[in-house]
Image: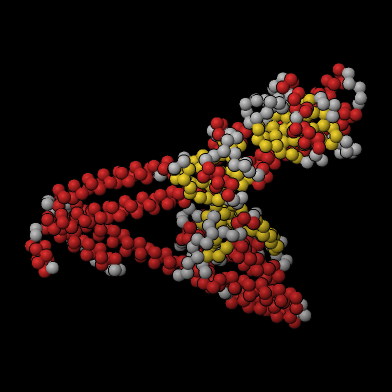
Amino acid sequence: MDRIKSLFRNILIRYKIIIIYIPLIIIPLLILGWISNYIFTEEIIKKTFINVQDDSSLILTRINGLIANTESCANIIVKDMNGKNIKSLFEVQDNNEAFAFEKRREILYVLNYALVIFPEVESAAFIDSHNDIYYTSKNSKSSLEPAIDSEIIKKINASNGVNLWFPMQRSDYLVDDKNEAVLMLGKKVLDIDRGNMLGALILNINESSISSIYDKLGTSKGGNYFIADEAGKVVSSKNKEELFKAKAQELTRVILGSSSSLQKTVYVDGKETLITKTPIEKMNWTLVNQTDLIQLTSEIKKLSVITFWIGLTCLAIALFGGSMLSNLIAKPIVKLTRKMQKVKEGSLDIQYDVDSTDEIGLLASGFNSMLERIRSLLDKIKEEQKKKREYELALIQAQIKPHFLYNTLDLIYIFCSMGRNKEAQSTTKNLADFYRIALSKGKEIITIEEELKNVENYLSIQRVRYSDIFDYEIKGEETVLGFDIPKLTIQPLVENSIYHGLKLKGSFGRLLIESYIEGEDVVIKIIDDGIGIPEEKLKTVLEHDQAERQSFGLTSVNERIKLYFGDEYGLKMESIVGQGTTAVIRIPKQKEGRQTSV
C-alpha cells in the first residue's frame, strides 16, 4: 500500500487526473444511467396511471351522462305522448288517411323534438298498439317491419314501463346504418290515466358516439380505450374491427377478475402492458385503458442510448484532455472549492481574490457576486421581517388602545348596573373574541373568515356605543372565507371609516363590507357613506411619509399586504367628498401559504 501511495504521489498530475477520471466518469455514468432509467420509467408509469385514472373518470362521467340523457329523452317522449292532443289520437278508432297523416305528424314531431333536445340519441322509433311504426331513421319502412316481431319489442311489451337497455348490437331494423353498432333503450309507453299500452319506444345510440369520447378525453400516450361487457367482449372501441370480439386471454382475465377499479401491469401477447379498468355499473360494462409499456417508455430508451454515447464521448475527451490539465487549472479550482466549502458551512464573510480573466477568473468573479447578492438578500429579508413585525406590533398596539378598552368596560359596567345582563354578556364575549383573534397566538396570517369575525366583534361593540350614528352589513361569497389574509387588515379600515367618516357626518350612516372573487384575486371592499376624503389628501393618504395618525392604519395595511403578497397587491382608496369612501383590498387566492411568525 505504501508503494502504491508513493508511486501515485510521484506520477505527474495529468496522469493522476486521467487515472482518477476513468472511474469517476464510467462508474457514476453507469449508475446514473441505470437509476435515471429506473426512476423515469417508474415516474412515467405512475403519472400515466394518474392521467389514465383522471381521463377514465371524465370518460365515465360523459358515458353516464349520455346514458342519463337518453333515459331522460325516453321519459320526456312518454310524457309528451300522454299530452292531451296526442293521447286523443290513440283513442280515435277512425283510421282514414287524413287522420293517419295527422297522427303520424304529431308523433314524429314529439320524436324529432326530443332528438333535438338530446343530440346523443341518433334515432328513435315508436310502434303503437296497432303495429304502426313511426320512426326518425333514414331507412325505408320495409327495413323496420321485422322489428314488430322481434324479441326486443316482445320484452318491451312484457315490461311495466321501466327503461330497458339492450346489449350493444348490429341490427337490421330501427337503425340508420345496419353496419353501425348501436345501443338500444326500450320503453313501454303507457297511458298514465288509464294504464293501457300506447306503444313501444326505441331509442338508438351509435357506438361511435361513445367511442368518440375517447378521442376527446383520452390523452395518455400510446393508450387504447375500449369497453367490455360482462362476458369480456368488446362493445365499444376506436378500432371497429375489435367490436364483439374477446381480447387476449391475459387481458380478459384481468377484465373479468374484479368488479372494482383496478390498475395493473400484465403481459399481453408477450408485451408488458399497463391496464386500468373502471366499472360502468349502470350497463355492467368495464372501461379499460390498455397502454403498451414499450411505446410509453420509448423516449427513455432513446435517452439511455444518447446518454451512453455521451458518456463514451466524455470519457474520450477526459482521457485526451487529462494530459493537458495542470496546476494552472487545478489549483484555482481547489482553492475555489475550499471557499465554497466554507460557504456551505455557513461562512458568508469571505472573498475570493481574482487575479485572472480566464474562465476560472470569471467563475471566481461570479462566486464573489453570488456571495454579495446572498448577503444583500439576507439583509433585505431581515429588513422585511423587521418591517412585518413593526407593522404587526403597531397594529396590535393600535387595537389594544386604553380608551377603546376603557370605554367598552364602562359600557359593560353600565349594562350590569342597569340589570341588562344579556347585553353585558354579549359585549364581554365580543371584546374577548376581538382580542383573541387580534393576538391569534402569534400567527400573522389567518383566514378571511377569522378576520371578518374579528371585524364583526369590533362592530358589534361600536354599534352599541354609536347606535345613533351608524349601522353595518357584512356580506360576500362563501368561497372567499377559506383564503389567507394578514390579520388586522380589515379592522383598521373599518375603524377609519367610523371615526373619520361616519362619526363626523352629522347624520345616521351605513357601513358595508363585501367580499368576492375576481379572477385569481380576492377583493374586499369597505364602503361608508361618511364625509369622504378631499382629493388632495386622497392622493397622499397611502404614502410612507404621511405623518397624520389617522392614515397610519391605512399605510400599515397597504404595506403589509405588499410585503406578504407582492407589489401588485395592496390597498386602494376611492372617495367623493360628501358621499363617502371605499377602501378596496386586493389579495391573491391563497390558502395556508405564509403562516410565518417573526
Q: Is residue 264 above or below residue 334?
A: above
On the question of residue 527 being in view, the answer is: no
At 51% from the left and 67% from the top, the residue drawn is 444
Q: Position of residue 386 (x, y in %)?
A: 42, 68
Residue 335 lies in quadrant: bottom left
At 59% from the left and 64% from the top, the residue drawn is 451
Q: Is residue 349 left or right of residue 323?
A: right
Q: Is residue 293 above or below residue 10?
A: above
Q: Which quadrant: the C terminus?
A: bottom left
- Between 339 and 180, the one nearer to me in the picture: 180
On the question of residue 74 being in view, the answer is: yes
Q: Is residue 332 above or below residue 220?
A: below
Q: Is residue 47 above or below residue 474?
A: above
Q: Position of residue 38 (x, y in %)?
A: 38, 52
- Between 355 and 153, the one nearer to me in the picture: 153
Q: Position of residue 291 (x, y in %)?
A: 48, 43
Looking at this rendering, what residue extends furthest in the bottom direction? 417
Q: Is residue 327 left or right of residue 286?
A: left
Q: Is residue 55 left or right of residue 527?
A: left
Looking at this rendering, what residue extends furthest in the right direction? 93
- Between 568 and 179, the one nearer to me in the picture: 179
At 71% from the left and 27% from the top, the residue drawn is 174
Looking at this rendering, what residue extends furthest in the top direction? 97
- Between 219 and 241, the one nearer to me in the picture: 241
